[in-house]
Amino acid sequence: MNPQTPHSPDVELLTRLGFAPGNPLMTEPRVLVDRSFLSRLRTELDETLDADTAHRVRSQIGLFHGLREGRRAVSRARDDVVGGVVSRPDTPSIAMTLLARGGCDGLEIHGEWPHSAEARATDHGGARNCVLAAGYTSGWLSEICGSTLVAVETECRAQGQARCAFVARPAEEWRARHDAEVEQFVDSLPFETFRTLLRENSARGLGLGAEGHSPLGATPWTAHVWGPVMVLPFQSSVTALRDLENDCGIRVVVVDLRTAYTNGLEEKSLRASLEKFLDHVSSWGVESVLAAPPPAVESLLPELRNGPHVARPTLPEAISTAFQIAHANRSGA
Ligand SMILES: [Zn+2]
């Protein structure tokens, strides 16, 4: 972590759970709307954490995405104005309909999430179920309006209501209402810490686009399963394959090749183990996307058995492609 980044237990916990700011899962917008991802995320967090913490983590994942996308939308709009160009505005990844009362200054925005993706991914909705969407919307609206607005869900499909609806108001207005549950939600959103992180990322030229800064390249990391997509480092293939064998929900595996050479494999043995690995993957009817192959591996790709293989130059692009393949498979099924 950057030494200038303020010490934050929230960021530490997110990092431990595989959601470090800059991790591709914090820059890939499909994770916000993929029903099986949302469902698995919820199950995993509920199994790992107490209910309040799981709730908090989901809202923070949403907030980070919302702030990041809102910042990008504002900065692109500004570039367009300066350049005299009017392009299609950036739309939020979580679709929302908005009815602003008094505009951004009147500070009360009513809206709904017409797709209710988070509610549809849940079979048991508690009160204020859709906190990832609420966190996302809080971040997105805050950046668009240039203030700190918090969106609180007021109706939810997961509780049998006709829609998922929310009201967004300034954080201090929510606090003045003395609703303990809402105050807890407002306090769970680390706006300033996340804004600092996003500013640092843009100052370091890491941008606000889909290509985030990944701290993963420097350290070994374990396999992660997100809905239909599993990301795993090639070098831990033996363990990862066992995980995969036990999991029927995975449709696409992203094989992270960034560190493929760090374990000192010769070309011949690298090719043999990569082929063996990809053969295993395809024998389970799971597709693979190869991420960030170093040049030495890239030159091997055309020679691999069972090719051609889909490869992408960066991990975020590979994850994005994997989600596209998973979606295409589902709609084609
Ligand atoms: Zn809902």
Image (tube, helix red, strand yellow):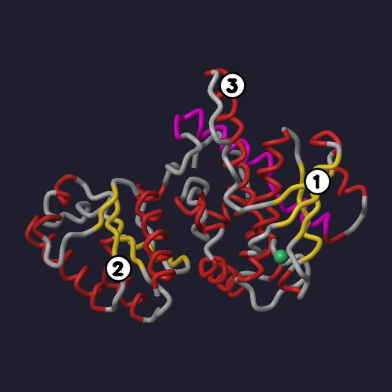
Residue type indicated by callout 3:
Val
Numbered tag placed on residue 287 in the rendering: 2
Give the percent coordinates (x, y) of residue 178. Answer: 92, 54
Numbered tag placed on residue 109 in the rendering: 1
Residue type indicated by callout 2:
Glu
Q: Among all residues in the image, which is located at the extreme right?
A: 177
Query: Is 302 placed above or below 43 here?
Result: above
Q: Are circles 1 and 3 on residues that touch, CB within 8 Å?
A: no
Task: Point out the tag, 1 or 3, that comes first from the N-terminus.
Answer: 3
Name the residue rendered at 81%, 36% in the picture.
103
Give the percent coordinates (x, y) of residue 150. Answer: 77, 48
Query: Is 42 placed above or below 146 here?
Result: below
Task: Point out the tag, 2 or 3, that comes first from the N-terminus.
Answer: 3
Q: Are circles 2 and 3 on residues that touch, CB within 8 Å?
A: no
Q: Which residue is mark 3?
A: 81
- Count residues near mark 1 (Cα–Cα under 10 Å), then give few for <14, some for 14-19, many for 20+: many
Give the percent coordinates (x, y) of residue 134. Answer: 70, 55
Start-end of magenta stretch? 182-206
